[in-house]
Structure formats: C-alpha cells, structure tokens
Image (spheres, rainbow, N blue to C red):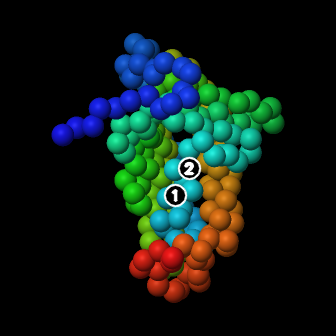
Amino acid sequence: MTQKAAPVAGADEPVPAVKRTPWALFPILIGLPDIEIEIQADRRLAFEVLTAFGASQGSEGSSRVLFRDGERLLVEFRVPVRGLLGIQQTFRTVEWVTLQAPNQIDSEGVTGPLPLLRDRFTLEERGACTKFRYQSTFGVRGWIPGWLVGMLYVRPTMKRFMRNHAEEVKQTIEARAARCKIYPQRLCHEEPTLEPAQ
C-alpha cells in the first residue's frame, strides 16, 4: 500500500509544480568535474549530517523540507554564492531530493536561477572513513550566447562553490564524528563499527 504524501507541518508556501516552464525543456547541459574527498567519519554518520535538512547548512545557508513522500523530499535551499567578482548573492532553490541511505543522495532542481540542476552525493565506505563524491550538472538557456555565459561565468562559479561546499561538508561531519558516541571517530585503516554503539 502506497503511503499518501503530505506537506510538512510549518511549510507556509504551496508545493511548487514539478512541471517545468517551456524554456527549460531543452537546456544546454554543462557538466562539472567530480570532487572526491576522504572524510574521517562513519558513512552512516556522514549520511545523517548531509540529510539533516532544517539544520544550518554552513556559511549562513539554510534548508527546510516543504513536502515529504517516503524517501523523496521537496526541499527549499537558500545558498550564498560568491561570484567571480567577489560579490555574494543568496539564491533560493527548490529541489526534489531522493535518499538512498546510506549510499547516495540525488537532487534535481524544480525552481531556481538555473533551468536545470542535478546533483549527486555518493558515500563509499573506506575502512572506518568515507569517500565522498560530489557530482553536478547544470543547464543554461540561450543557445550559443547562453552556453558562453555558462562556460565563462556559471561553470567557474559553480566549481568554486562545489569545492568550498565539499570542504565545509568534511569539516562539519568530522567535527560531529569527534564528539559522536553512536558512530565514534576512528582511524581510516580500521574496520567500521558494525553496530551503532549504545
């Protein structure tokens, strides 16, 4: 029996329509290089921290769940991004986030400054640590002029944001691991804890 999805209490805005506007049907896709880092923390803890929507997102960012349907969430993000000229802007995006605990988190933009945005976080067990992979693809409109803007401005901005975000993720998760009793922090060459500590 399929559980009926329902809005999350406290969400004061209607659920955005998932149907895209016509100009976003055929965006020009631009991929970004994957980012991989090693996090000294249990993979299960890393997944918990990454999916703690509603908590602080680092660098004054924020998130909240608007709608929940099992492992699929509609999440609003407010993310500060510094452009190439050093000017910081806060962008609002609404994204469908699909959880595959504790291995993977996929998100797809519904509304936001870009016609298309797809992100994937992959968590791979490396002994008692976690290999974190960040993949992202975005889309721009406007044919050749749009592609040029995407390559010369949006792509470098997104690359820098991804690097900074990955480093913030690492610091946040490792700080949590250092004081966590359920998934205690261990050396990477050690075996992960099979069962959470009581």
Which quadrant of the structure image shows residue 167? bottom right
- Tell me if residue 169 can be seen: yes
Which of the two residues, 125 or 154, is positioned nearer the viewer here?
125
- Residue displayed at 51% across by 86% down: 190
- Residue displayed at 51% across by 24% down: 111
Q: Position of residue 143 (x, y in %)?
A: 48, 20
Picture quarter with the N terminus: top left
Q: Position of residue 161 (x, y in %)?
A: 66, 44
Q: Position of residue 139 (x, y in %)?
A: 48, 30
- Tell me if residue 148 can be seen: no
Residue sitting farthest toward the top: 22
Q: Secondary structure at mark 1?
A: helix
The residue identified by callout 1 is 48
Q: Count the marks: how many?
A: 2
- Residue displayed at 42% across by 77% down: 195
Which of the two residues, 66 or 157, is positioned nearer the viewer here?
66
Above or below — where is 196 with respect to 139?
below
Which quadrant of the structure image shows residue 24? top left
Which of the two residues, 162 or 64, is positioned nearer the viewer here?
64
- Residue displayed at 47% across by 32% down: 8
Q: Secondary structure at mark 2?
A: loop
Residue type at numbered disc 1: Glu
Residue type at numbered disc 2: Ala
Above or below — where is 166 with respect to 114?
below
Q: Disc 2, disc 1: CB below 8 Å?
A: yes
The residue identified by callout 2 is 52
Q: Residues within 10 Å of mark 1 (few under 14, many from 20)?
A: few
Q: Is residue 162 left or right of residue 29?
A: right
Cα separation between marks 2 and 1: 6 Å
